[in-house]
């Protein structure tokens, strides 16, 4: 039973790009077979096909050399991501992640008031014309997501998701399908950034008239929170704490968007 290391190691990438260079990778767990990172939103999991942007994998390769991709997170999704440190571990971990025995949980803020709980089983495939856009289609791959509302707010809900398959954009597509897309999702939602002015209607004033309001949540409000699986006879529970933007947004929702009891 492994939880995040209390003294998380921070790995500073030795890369030329000053934006990436300023990032510190938050290492949650590491052994001879794997390294587990709490990925910040905005950082790619693996290099894009043009190789122009830094990624978690490229930063790790600077430090460890050979690093193997087990799974991925969307660029604007924060949270737990695992890489293998050798080919044997990569094979085993990849099989685990493709199987049904692993428990993968996410947290997200959705628009509106979804049912208290539910299961979405809708096949998914890539759109034939819109590259990088996933759609629900009977001929797509089997996809299953369960969800449970942790807390309702007036305009939003804080939801726990569990995915049983690992399709691209799965939670985002299934959330859209039930009519409650992830907040600030510019691909499957309205892309509307969550701002304090939108939840604090009265007495909201910017410090300066000409100042543009910075959003509380400027990216899709989705976080890969935990994975639990058996590896080499040991049960592992790995957890990634919420990033500052999500924590701060939840505090403001509690303060200004709470539902009257």
Image: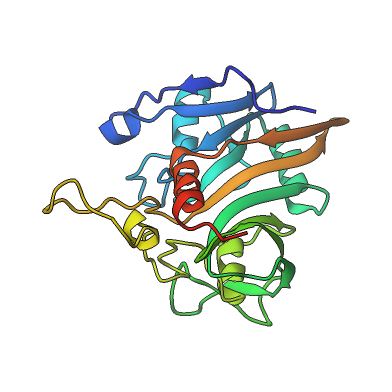
Q: 107 or 68, which is in the foreground? A: 107
Image quarter in which the C terminus is found: bottom right
Name the one closer to the observer, 155 or 125: 155
Visible residue check, residue 137: yes
The structure residue drawn at horizontal position 63% and vertical position 62%, both measured from the top left corner, is 167
| Relative horizontal placement of residue 47, taking residue 260 as reference (left or right) | left
Q: Is residue 225 above or below residue 127?
A: above
* Quadrant of residue 198 within the rendered picture: bottom left
User: In the picture provided, is 162 more to the left or to the right than 152?
Assistant: right
**Height in image: 39 above or below 74?**
above
Residue at (35% x, 54% y) in the render:
196
In this rendering, is residue 121 above or below 233? below
Q: Name, please, the residue furthest toward the left.
A: 210
255 is higher (above) or lower (below) than 126: above
Question: In x, y percent, where is residue 143?
Answer: 70, 67
Name the foreground residue: 199 vs 26: 199
What residue lies at 48% left-to-right and 53% top-to-bottom? Answer: 253
Q: Is residue 51 left or right of residue 73?
A: left
Q: Residue furthest right?
A: 233
Pick out the residue farthest to the front.
261
Give the residue drawn at x 53%, y 53%. Answer: 222
Residue 121 percent across, percent down from the top left: 73, 72
């Amino acid at each position: 039973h492994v939880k995040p290391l209390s003294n998380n190691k921070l790995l500073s990438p030795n890369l030329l790009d000053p934006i990436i260079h300023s990032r510190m990778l938050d290492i949650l767990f590491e052994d001879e077979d794997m390294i587990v990172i709490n990925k910040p939103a905005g950082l790619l999991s693996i290099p894009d096909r043009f190789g122009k942007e830094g990624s978690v994998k490229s930063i790790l390769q600077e430090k460890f050399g050979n690093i193997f991709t087990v799974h991925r997170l969307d660029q604007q999704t924060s949270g737990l991501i695992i890489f293998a440190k050798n080919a044997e571990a990569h094979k085993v971990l990849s099989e685990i992640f493709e199987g049904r025995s692993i428990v993968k949980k996410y947290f997200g803020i959705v628009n509106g008031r979804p049912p208290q709980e539910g299961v979405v089983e809708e096949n998914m495939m890539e759109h034939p014309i819109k590259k990088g856009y996933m759609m629900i289609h009977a001929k797509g791959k089997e996809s299953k997501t369960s969800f449970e509302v942790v807390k309702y707010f007036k305009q939003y809900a804080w939801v726990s998701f569990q995915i049983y398959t690992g399709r691209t954009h799965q939670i985002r597509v299934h959330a859209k399908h039930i009519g409650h897309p992830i907040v600030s999702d510019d691909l499957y939602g309205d892309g509307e950034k969550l701002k304090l002015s939108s939840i604090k209607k009265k007495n909201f004033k910017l410090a300066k008239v000409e100042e543009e309001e910075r959003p509380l949540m400027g990216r899709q409000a989705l976080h890969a929170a935990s994975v639990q699986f058996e590896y080499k006879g040991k049960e592992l529970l790995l957890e990634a704490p919420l990033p500052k933007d999500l924590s701060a947004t939840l505090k403001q929702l509690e303060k200004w968007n709470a539902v009257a009891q």
